[in-house]
Amino acid sequence: MPAGISPFSCANGGGRRYSGIMSNTSSTLDVRIWRGGEDGAFQPFSVPRQEHQTVLDVVTYVQRELDPTLAYRFACRVGMCGSCGMTVNGRPRWTCRTHVETATRGSDVLELAPLRSLPIIRDLVTDMTPFFEKWQTAQGRATGSKTRADDTQKIDPASPRRQAADAAIECINCGVCYAACDVVASDPDYLGPAALNRAWTLMNDDREADRAGVLEAATAGGGCHSCHSHGSCVEHCPVGLNPSAGIAGLKRLSLLAMVGGKI
Amino acid sequence: MLPANSQRHAGRYAAFAHRLSGVLLAVFLPFHFLALGLAIEGEARLDSFLAWSDQPLVKVAEWGLVTLLSVHLLAGLRVLTLEFLPWRGPRKAWIAVGAVVAALTGILFFVSASA
């Protein structure tokens, strides 16, 4: 990477100017950014384009060089915190891990909007409250039965249940799957892929002390049976998780529980 | 107003093909029952209906019907597999295979009907 083009030069600290990163510009990007709340509109900006530029670089450039009133959210810039999710050219994405070239597919147009299906606070910032409340509704929290006086519970990492949990456990709550889901968009009560994926990991966790409660919460109205298996969550998950498979697993568990007279 | 997400991926197409084929098959069902009803009413009326159905346009419609049935059946099998069998990954190959089988079924019907 040439000198002065470090992606970290746009760090959010110390009042440092957003300089250097936009050297070597070869063309201009036509950026349209959502401004305002639910009744807002797209505002055009012209941003110098450069190699290896991420979408977050573009937003940061606009905020620091063109319009300091632009509101957006980010923290780590390396795909760990999950706070920079936005709708990029119609697709929900992490902006820090999305290159402009990937998002524009050869064009010079970049349209940025807040994540769908979440209330807009302002510009590109959404209120994640409904998303996290649904985690709680799906009982997406661990319930333990041990005390610190007990021995550590032995878990066989090769067991099918642990492997199923491991395959789904790396979710960082970015909300991209939630914004991508067609059912969430049409049914406000649907808990969404992330919350149900969390419930699936708990159902496969031998340490979970209230699996019956998790299953009951995950199969209640707006739960796993509302999923239409479109697979948009799988398609868009930046971590490569498969909430759709977990939700199908919850459906199977609920069927077995129903046949067994447990729910 | 925010524009809708533009989500172009195979799983979504498969789901919509499943629903659309189901709706179109439901539209066809009254005609199917009409043909069955005519068969009960008498041979002559059924024969005249079958003669009417020999028109090229109706044959094309029949081809469409068979293809729709194939699409709906295979998309339904996909959903049942997704819901009742353990699986991982996006499973787009299932959709590709289903689309090819549905197309082949339609072609086979068209060739055999034109022969």
Image (cartoon, coloured by chain):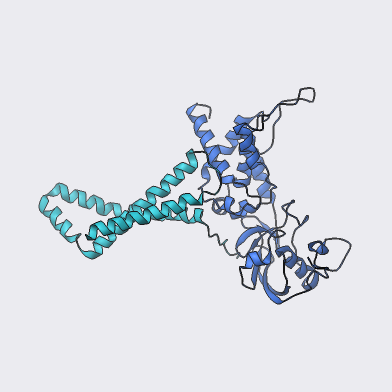
- Residue drawn at point x = 41 percent, y = 46 percent: B76
- Residue drawn at point x = 27 percent, y = 52 percent: B30
Which image quadrant is residue B114 in? bottom left
- Residue drawn at point x = 62 percent, y = 72 percent: A107
**Residue projecting furthest to the bottom:** A27
User: In the image, residue A97 lies at what x, y percent?
Assistant: 70, 58
- Does residue A140 appear left or right of residue A219 in this picture? right
A48 versus A189 height, above or below:
below
Q: Considering the image in quadrants, where does the N terminus of chain A appear?
A: bottom right
User: In the image, residue A145 lies at what x, y percent?
Assistant: 71, 26
- Does residue B34 appear left or right of residue A103 in this picture? left
Can residue B19 be seen at all in this image of the molecule? no
Which image quadrant is residue A217 in? top right
Near-viewer residue (A214 or A253): A253
User: In the image, residue A239 lies at what x, y percent?
Assistant: 66, 50
**Residue projecting furthest to the front:** A1
- Does residue A251 appear left or right of residue B54 in this picture? right
A27 versus A34 height, above or below:
below
- Residue drawn at point x = 76 percent, y = 23 percent: A151
Can residue A36 be seen at all in this image of the molecule? yes
**Residue projecting furthest to the left:** B44
Which image quadrant is residue A30 in? bottom right
B1 versus B96 height, above or below:
below
- Does residue B42 appear left or right of residue A144 in this picture? left
Near-viewer residue (B53 or B91): B91
Colour cyan belongs to chain: B
Colour blue belongs to chain: A
User: In the image, residue B41 lies at what x, y percent?
Assistant: 14, 49
